[in-house]
Amino acid sequence: MSFHALVIGANSTIAKAAIQQLENDPLCQGVFSVSRTVSNSEESLTRKTVWIACDYSASSIEEACKLISSKSVLITKVLICNGVLHNDTMMPEKKLEDINQQQLEHTLYANTITPMLWLSQLMPILRGKEPTQVAIFSARVGSISDNNMGGWYSYRASKAALNMLIKTSAIEYARRAKNVKLMAFHPGTTDTPLSKPFQSSVPKGKLFTAEFVAKQLLDIMNTVPMDNEASFLDWNNKSIDW
């Protein structure tokens, strides 16, 4: 069955790979791609994609959702790819003395608050009869039960909080939008700017291309059980303990 997709955080490396694969999918009729900025080159190189600029404030997300809703198309695949681990002014904390308010706030907003604002605003758009999958990029280090090494305080906390919000949202979606499946997705260590500072310690064969991860995710979305429960899955479709 034909469908439309929505990719949020569309300028990330994995998101771009997913958009390309969706464009090549004959069943995909169109892709809404949301990013902070939209360049002329992006607009001119895409055949099926509509680019939407959004600064990820609450009001901007609400406006983007109104625009998407006005198109009156069936969206059955959503990828929420937003996230931050480091930037020019911050790196993951190695010890308690590294923790600072600004980094905590910035990381929590990007990794936790932004995806949750989207889940809130998308409910009316996604509610319908057709099976719909929503994949939110999480991380294995957000698993509380799997935390044996410590460190990375703000990133771990932001992803653990995101996982709780996904599980909680799935309970309400199950009542109000029974066609929707929510997934927290761990892409593994992928060759992207996010992982660059840490790639030297990645075991051989465990640094994935963005194209590989995007294909894995889209395949998972096509086959995941529509059970009205949140799932925490890795790139290999294996469950991760919350």
Image (tube, grey):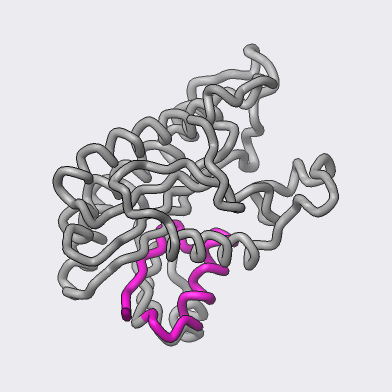
Residue 129 appears left or right of 139: left
Residue 195 appears left or right of 12: right
Residue located at (59% from left, 39% from top): 85
Residue located at (73% from left, 48% from top): 196
Question: Can you give x and y, in whole percent of width and height, for residue 168 in the image?
Answer: 29, 33
Residue located at (32% from left, 74% from top): 4
Q: Residue furthest top?
A: 97
Question: Can you give x and y, in whole percent of width and height, for residue 209 in the image?
Answer: 69, 62
Q: Quadrant where the N terminus lies? A: bottom left
Q: Is residue 191 above or below residue 90?
A: below
Question: Can you give x and y, in whole percent of width and height, for residue 152 in the image?
Answer: 62, 26
Q: Within the magenta stretch, is there residue 223?
A: no
Viewer-proximal residue among 193 and 199: 199
- One can see residue 13 in this view: yes
Q: Is residue 71 above or below residue 177?
A: below
Q: Which residues are magenta?
A: 1-28
Q: Within the magenta stretch, is there residue 26?
A: yes
